[in-house]
Amino acid sequence: MPEEQIVEEGSARIKLGERVFYNPKMERLRSISVLFLKAAMPNAGNVLDATTATGIRGIRYALEANAQKVTMLDTNPNACRLAEANIKMNGLEGRLNVVNTSLQKFANNNSAEKFDVIDIDPFGTPAPFIYDAMKLCKNNTLMLITATDTATLCGAEGNACLRIYSSVPARNELCHEASIRILLAFTARIAAQFGFGIEPLLSFSELHYVRIFIKLNKGAKQAVESVKKIGYASSCSKCHAYYYEQGQIPKLSTTCKYCGNATTLFGPLWLSSIYDKSIVKGMLNMCDSKNEQIYKTLLALTEEADIPFFYNIDKVCEYIGTGSVSKKQVIENLESIGYIATTTVFGKNSIKTNASISEVIDAVKSYVGKYTRKS
C-alpha cells in the first residue's frame, strides 16, 4: 500500500488519493477565492462547490471564509469518498455534504434550493456548467467561474472559441484580457435567459486559467442592461491601435483610423468594468503578509484604470522606430496633458489609458525627443 499523502493548504489538512485530481499550483487561486468571499460576503451561508475533487476548496471556504453550509458535487465516486474523509479530518461533519452526481442532475433535481455562492472550477471549459448553475441562483448570488481552456479563449483555437463561446478571440497581445471579456459576455447572455444581470467583482487571467467572480442581479431590466454592455473590438496589427463599441451588431470600421491598415474584429465580449475596486481593496486589507505575490497582484489592480484593453509600449516603439521607452515616462506624459494612464496586470511595459494611439505615440516621441536633446 502506498504511504498516505497529506498536504496542508491554508487552514486545511487533506489527504490526497489516486485518481482524484489535486493541483498544488492552484493554491494561489484558492487563496484569492477565500479572500474574495471574506470581502464580498463575510457570512457566506449556502455554498455550492460544483466540482469538488479532494474537497479542498469547500473545506477552506468553511474554515477560512465562514461558509455555514457547503454542498460538494463530483461525478467521481473515488473523489466523493476522499472528500468525505477530508471533511472528517477537518472536523466539519454536519456543515459539509458530498453528493456523487453531476451539476446538471443536481440542478434539475434540486432547483428549489438556491445558493448564496456557486463555485465552478472544471477541467477545461465551464460553458456546459453555467446554464445549469443558473437554475440554482437567486438575487445577489455570487458565481465564481474558472476556465482552463485558455488555448480556446486566447485565440490558438479560434474555431473552438466560436463553437463554445460564440465569439471570435483576439490573437495578439490583447488576448488574455479579451479572454476574460469573452467569458463574461458568454455568462451574461446565459444569465439574461434566467432574468439576471451580471456585475463583475473580480477577474483574473494567469498561468493556464481565466477566473471571473460575478454577482447576479435579478430583474428583466438588469438582464437587458447587462447584455447591452456586450459589444465588439478590433485591433490594428501595424500601429497596434484598438477600437471597441458596445452593441449587438458590429459597427466598427475595418480600417485603422490612425495608419489606414486593415483591422481585425473580435468578439462579442464584455466591454464594461471587470472588477469592483472596493472589493479588491477589501481583499488587500485582509491579505496576509505571507502571501506577497497575491498582495502585489491586488495592489496592482487597485492602481489600474478599469478601461478596456491597453497599449504595449514596446510594440508602439517598434512601430515608430525608436528605442525602448519606459511605461512610467509615457504615463507621466499622458497624465500631464489630462489623460488617465496607469500600468496594467495584463502586460509588461504596457499601459491602460483613455488616450488614443495618436496621443500615445506623441507621448513616446516627446520622451524620446527630451532624452535625445539631453544626450
Image (tube, helix red, strand yellow):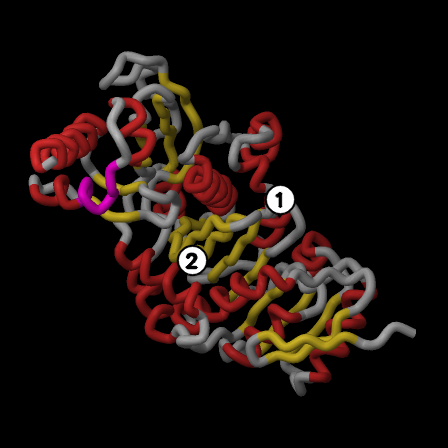
Residue 83 on image: x %, y %: 73, 72
Where does label 1 land, which residue?
A: 125
Q: Is residue 234 magenta?
A: no
Q: Nearer the viewer, residue 277 or 131?
A: 277
Residue plotted at (41% across, 49% down) = 197
Left or right of residue 130, residue 333 in this image: left
| Image position of 283 with respect to 171: above or below | below
Q: Say few, some or many: other residues with alpha carbon within 10 Å of mark 2 (under 14 / 14 to 19 / 20 or more).
A: many
Please name the predominant secondary structure of the magenta segment in the image. helix
- Quadrant location of residue 257? top left
Where does label 2 land, which residue?
A: 215
Q: Say few, some or many: other residues with alpha carbon within 10 Å of mark 1 (under 14 / 14 to 19 / 20 or more).
A: many
Q: In the rendered structure, which segment of residues is drawn in magenta?
A: 325-331
Left or right of residue 161, residue 198 in this image: left
| Image position of 112 with respect to 247: above or below | below
| Image position of 132 with respect to 242: above or below | below
Q: Nearer the viewer, residue 333 or 178?
A: 333
Disc 2 marks which amino acid? Answer: Lys
Helix or strand or loop: what does disc 2 sit on?
A: strand
User: Can you tell which of label 2 and label 1 is closer to the viewer?
Assistant: 1
Could you give the CA–CA distance between mark 2 and mark 1, rounded to whole angstroms?
20 Å
Disc 1 marks which amino acid? Answer: Thr
